Image: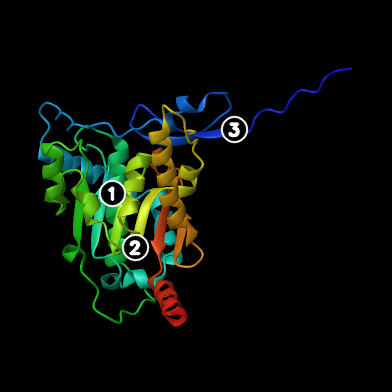
């Protein structure tokens, strides 16, 4: 009589960081103890400004920016995103003065060090704003004067920014702030652009306020990471990770009433859109909830 083989264990999702600095959620079929998973170790180590490549100038960054922007605008992913934004995003977003008064970019990375994903993220962010502020759907009739894009404050924060990165972003009209100043700038009327942040930083940003719009790692993926079990040696990690999951859960718990989300389409030239979602809060439904709460009182 032969013994039946045990079925393979259900693969666990783990968080790993590749050589390009990207954080991914992957499935692991290998048995490991929970404290060996990459997602269980704190990544909040002190980051320093990156070095400026010898001979690189602001003009070089402008040329690189123009190259990536041209490539992005002609990509199928950009066209798919335009269609997604115009069809999935509610019309109220195109009356942006009532919804978004500031934008905050977290963890973009150093542009002067040639990190491709940073450039793709930047040009996507630019076209996202242009779609919302400058190119609303043709059937959208403006009832009130919309906030102009140049009147909307844009802040960028990343400890790895060097002086050349800061100069380039300021040349685009952005305000570069030092860590952790940007977290205190997040409000309910913020567009938060934070794809593939470390889980701790992502939760910290969302814990400040529920931004009107957020581009970031799929929160469902964050919730599926392996959590450290409490013990004498790692109780602090357990408490921190539990608090982080509560923040993600709280954001998602209202998905059926005041918030919605959609996954970004795949980009054939870089994996940065993988596991990335666009979240938004519907202010109309939010107002309805507030009215219902007042009626109950």
- Which sits earlier in the primary sequence, circle 1 or circle 3? 3
Query: Does residue 141 appear anywhere in the picture?
Result: yes
Q: Position of residue 149 (x, y in %)?
A: 21, 64
Disc 2 versus disc 3: distance between alpha carbons? Answer: 34 Å
Q: Which mark is residue 11?
A: 3
Q: Pick out the residue farthest to the right.
A: 1
Left or right for 74, reference 110: right
Left or right for 100, reference 253: left
Q: Position of residue 248 (x, y in %)?
A: 43, 51
Kindly identify the residue that appears in the image at 22 percent across and 38 percent down.
111
Q: Secondary structure at mark 1?
A: helix
Q: Which mark is residue 194?
A: none
**Mark 1 or mark 3, which is nearer to you?**
3
Q: Secondary structure at mark 2?
A: loop
Marks 1,2: beta carbons within 8 A: no
In this view of the protein, which residue sits in the foreground, 147 or 159? 159
User: Looking at the figure, which quarter contains the N terminus?
Assistant: top right
Kindly identify the residue that appears in the image at 22 percent across and 53 percent down.
184
Left or right for 15, reference 10: left
Q: Which residue is mark 2?
A: 212
The 10 Å Cα crowd at callout 1, few under 14, some 14 to 19, many 20 or more, is some
- Which sits earlier in the primary sequence, circle 2 or circle 3? 3
The 10 Å Cα crowd at callout 2, few under 14, some 14 to 19, many 20 or more, is many
User: Looking at the figure, which quarter contains the C terminus?
Assistant: bottom left
Kindly identify the residue that appears in the image at 18 percent across and 49 percent down.
181
In this view of the protein, which residue sits in the foreground, 280 or 34? 34
Q: Secondary structure at mark 3?
A: loop
> Toward which corner of the image does residue 282 lie, by quadrant?
bottom left
Q: Position of residue 16 (x, y in %)?
A: 43, 31
Q: Position of residue 223 (x, y in %)?
A: 48, 44
Marks 1,3: beta carbons within 8 A: no
Q: Which residue is mark 1?
A: 123
């Amino acid at each position: 009589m032969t013994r039946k083989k045990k079925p393979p264990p259900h693969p666990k999702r783990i968080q790993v960081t590749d050589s390009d600095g990207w954080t991914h959620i992957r499935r692991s079929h290998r048995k490991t103890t929970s404290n060996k998973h990459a997602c269980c170790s704190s990544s909040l180590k002190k980051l320093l400004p990156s070095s400026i490549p010898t001979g690189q100038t602001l003009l070089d960054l402008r040329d690189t920016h123009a190259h990536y922007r041209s490539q992005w605008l002609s990509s199928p992913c950009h066209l798919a995103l335009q269609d997604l934004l115009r069809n999935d995003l509610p019309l109220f977003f195109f009356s942006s003065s009532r919804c978004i008064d500031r934008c905050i970019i977290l963890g973009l990375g150093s542009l002067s060090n040639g990190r491709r994903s940073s450039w793709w993220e930047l040009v996507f962010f630019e076209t996202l704003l242009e779609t919302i502020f400058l190119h609303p759907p043709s059937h959208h009739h403006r009832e009130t004067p919309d906030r102009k894009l140049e009147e909307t404050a844009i802040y960028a924060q990343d400890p790895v920014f060097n002086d050349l990165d800061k100069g380039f972003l300021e040349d685009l009209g952005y305000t570069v702030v030092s860590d952790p100043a940007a977290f205190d700038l997040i409000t309910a009327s913020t567009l938060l652009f934070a794809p593939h942040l470390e889980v701790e930083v992502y939760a910290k940003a969302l814990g400040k306020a529920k931004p009107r719009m957020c581009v970031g790692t799929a929160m469902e993926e964050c919730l599926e990471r392996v959590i450290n079990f409490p013990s004498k040696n790692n109780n602090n990690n357990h408490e921190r990770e539990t608090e982080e999951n509560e923040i993600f859960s709280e954001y998602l718990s209202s998905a059926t009433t005041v918030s919605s989300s959609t996954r970004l389409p795949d980009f054939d030239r870089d994996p940065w859109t993988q596991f990335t979602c666009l979240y938004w809060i519907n202010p109309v439904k939010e107002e309805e909830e507030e009215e219902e709460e007042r009626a109950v009182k």
